Image (cartoon, rainbow, N blue to C red):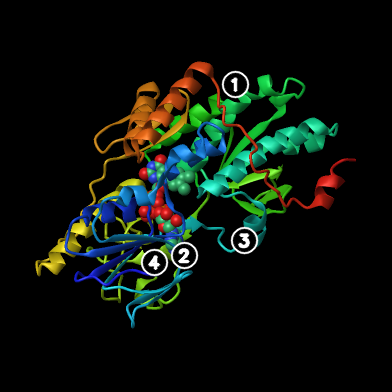
């Protein structure tokens, strides 16, 4: 990997997400050599991926070069590579560009979409965890409307204009709201020769309410907002099968849809070599103690979404959100320095700053630890918080200008099919719908 030897111990960080970057920043100018490895050369601001998928923002405005974050940090190295395996015995990781030894290893690799072993869903539905996936979704949404124009068959046209989003967490809710706004504000103008009133947005949630991690009040209000926007909300319903055209559920309900978006679960990114049973958490997460040390291993830590720090209060660990990732990264940085100085490490205590979701223009729900509010003020708070945490001054300016422009013009100008998405819906199924 061409990393020079250093007189300082080497900390290797896997992942330049919220957790990995906040750790890297907290180790700047400390007596350690830091090597950050990520399979992308940019940090992704995942909370705004749905705006890329729906043409509200360009992808570049929610991505930031990792090398730029690390600029000027002494004894810091970035390598663009995928980490495949950890060898705790040899204190080495195996990556797509070769092995690397570590003194301390920090796994901050986050999560990936979980299809719970359902291959029909994995093969045929759309995920939204990365920028390339969001661009695929953006292309598919627009391609489906272009294709809907080309057919006289009402049945097929309806399926091309039917969007089924599975998962009623923040991602599903935000995406459903954005699609409903597109249907209302943009489609009639873009496709005057298509009856876009027939377009449908179905949000399917397995649990009994939307946004289950938020208050009942926020769930109820989010549902009201979505229904006002014309979204069909299905609760207590699970999609069990999807062949690219027909989505079957656990009851008799079926959807004919050429676009099923899967936002119903994530699992920890899997790295080979961590075989101790004691570190296997729920959904592939790594069990850690209160110092973020992976159970059963010395000098291996995990932070962010991939870390499951369970307690009596939180049996499955902290919520998989940006705040725990940022806070754990910062805290572990201090602990690693303390350890090197021979001082005691301090246990991590999560400072819950609340959670929020936006449903659309002037519509958001915010749960703060002490009070809750919804509506236009919540929407302003949502925008402020997202701009604040977005990395990079240019990105903040570009996103802000885009939002102001979209707000005034009721528009989303990034509705571009730059790289057409080849959806693998079975051609025979698609063709058979024509008679
Ligand atoms: C669509 C969406 C919307 C969200 N909305 C919100 C929200 O509104 N508010 C909120 O608080 N949270 C939100 N979240 C969750 C939030 O984004 C995560 O909690 C946060 O990103 C976790 O940070 P992390 O550093 O643990 O992981 P990530 O940010 O996922 O970073 C992991 C990094 O590791 C890299 N990586 C993974 N595997 C490897 C490997 N094998 N080798 C090398 N590199 C690897 C990845 O490329 C990535 O850069 C959302 C998530 C999604 C997907």
Query: To which quarter of the image does residue 153 belong?
Result: top right
Residue 197 visible? The answer is: yes
- Nearest to N terminus: mark 2 or mark 1: 2
**Helix, strand, or loop for circle 3?**
loop
Asked if ligand 1 lies within 8 A of label 2, the reply is yes
Give me the C-alpha separation between circle 2 and circle 1. 41 Å
Kindly report the distance in space between the C-alpha atoms of the residues bearing marks 2 and 4. 22 Å
Q: Is residue 411 above or below residue 418?
A: above
Task: Give the labeled residue for mark 3.
Answer: 118
- As rendered, which of 222 and 287 lies closer to the eye? 287
Residue at image position (71%, 28%) is 198
Q: Nearer the viewer, residue 167 or 412?
A: 412
The residue lying at 40 percent from left, 47 percent from top is 65
Label 2 or label 4, whichever comes before in sequence order: 2
Sequence order check: which comes first, mark 2 or mark 3? Answer: 2
- Gap in angstroms between the C-alphas marked 3 and 4: 20 Å
Which one is nearer the viewer's eye here, 367 or 188?
A: 188
Mark 1 → mark 4, Cα distance in angstroms? 44 Å
Q: Residue furthest top?
A: 408
Q: Callout 1: helix, strand or loop?
A: helix
- In this rendering, the answer to whether 229 lies above or below 249 is above
Q: Which residue is disc 4 drawn over?
A: 281
Quarter of the image with the N terminus is: bottom left
Q: Is residue 48 visible?
A: no
Please tell me which of labels 1 and 3 falls first in the chain: 3
User: Circle 1 is placed at which residue position?
Assistant: 185
**Which class describes the residues within 10 Å of circle 1: few (<14), some (14-19), or many (20+)?**
some
Give x and y (percent) for residue 187: 66, 24
Q: Earlier in the sequence, mark 1 or mark 4?
A: 1
The earlier-in-sequence mark between 3 and 4 is 3
| Residues under numbered marks 1 and 4 in contact, where contact means CB atoms less than 8 Å apart | no
């Amino acid at each position: 990997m061409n990393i020079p030897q250093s007189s300082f111990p080497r900390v290797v960080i896997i992942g330049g997400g919220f957790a990995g970057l906040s750790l890297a920043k907290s180790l700047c100018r400390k007596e350690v050599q830091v090597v950050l490895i990520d399979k992308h050369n940019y940090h992704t601001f995942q909370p705004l991926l749905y705006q890329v998928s729906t043409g509200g923002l360009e992808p570049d405005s929610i991505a930031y070069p990792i090398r730029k974050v690390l600029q000027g940090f002494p004894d810091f190295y970035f390598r663009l590579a995928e980490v495949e395996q950890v060898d705790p015995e040899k204190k080495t990781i195996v990556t797509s560009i070769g092995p690397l030894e570590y003194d301390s290893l920090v796994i901050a690799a986050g999560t990936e979409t979980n299809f719970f072993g359902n291959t029909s869903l994995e093969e045929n539905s759309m995920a939204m965890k990365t920028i390339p996936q969001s661009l695929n979704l953006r292309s598919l949404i627009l391609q489906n409307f272009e294709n809907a124009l080309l057919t006289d068959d009402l049945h097929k046209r309806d399926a091309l204009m039917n969007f089924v989003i599975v998962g009623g967490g923040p991602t599903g809710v935000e995406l459903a709201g954005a699609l409903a706004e597109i249907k209302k504000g943009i489609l009639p103008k873009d496709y005057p020769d298509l009856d876009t009133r027939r377009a449908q947005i179905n949000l399917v949630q397995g649990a009994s309410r939307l946004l289950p991690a938020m208050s009942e009040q926020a769930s109820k209000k989010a549902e009201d907002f979505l229904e006002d926007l014309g979204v069909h909300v299905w609760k207590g319903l699970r999609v069990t099968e999807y062949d690219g055209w027909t989505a079957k559920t656990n009851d008799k309900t079926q959807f004919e849809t050429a676009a099923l978006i899967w936002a119903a679960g994530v699992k920890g990114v899997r790295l080979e070599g961590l075989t101790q049973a004691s570190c296997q958490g729920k959904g592939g997460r790594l069990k850690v103690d209160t110092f973020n040390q992976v159970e059963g291993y010395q000098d291996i830590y995990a932070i962010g979404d991939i870390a499951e720090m369970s307690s009596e209060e939180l049996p499955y660990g902290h919520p998989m959100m940006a705040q725990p990732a940022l806070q754990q990264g910062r805290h572990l940085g201090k602990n690693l320095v303390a350890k090197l100085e021979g001082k005691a490490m301090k246990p991590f205590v999560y400072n819950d700053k609340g959670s929020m979701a936006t449903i659309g223009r002037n519509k958001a729900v915010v749960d703060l630890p002490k009070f809750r509010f919804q509506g236009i003020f919540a929407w302003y708070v949502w925008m402020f918080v997202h701009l604040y945490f977005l990395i990079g001054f240019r990105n903040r300016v570009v996103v802000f200008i885009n939002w102001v422009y979209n707000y005034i013009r009721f528009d989303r100008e990034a509705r571009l099919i730059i790289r057409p998405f080849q959806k693998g819906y079975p051609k025979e199924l698609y063709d058979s719908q024509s008679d």
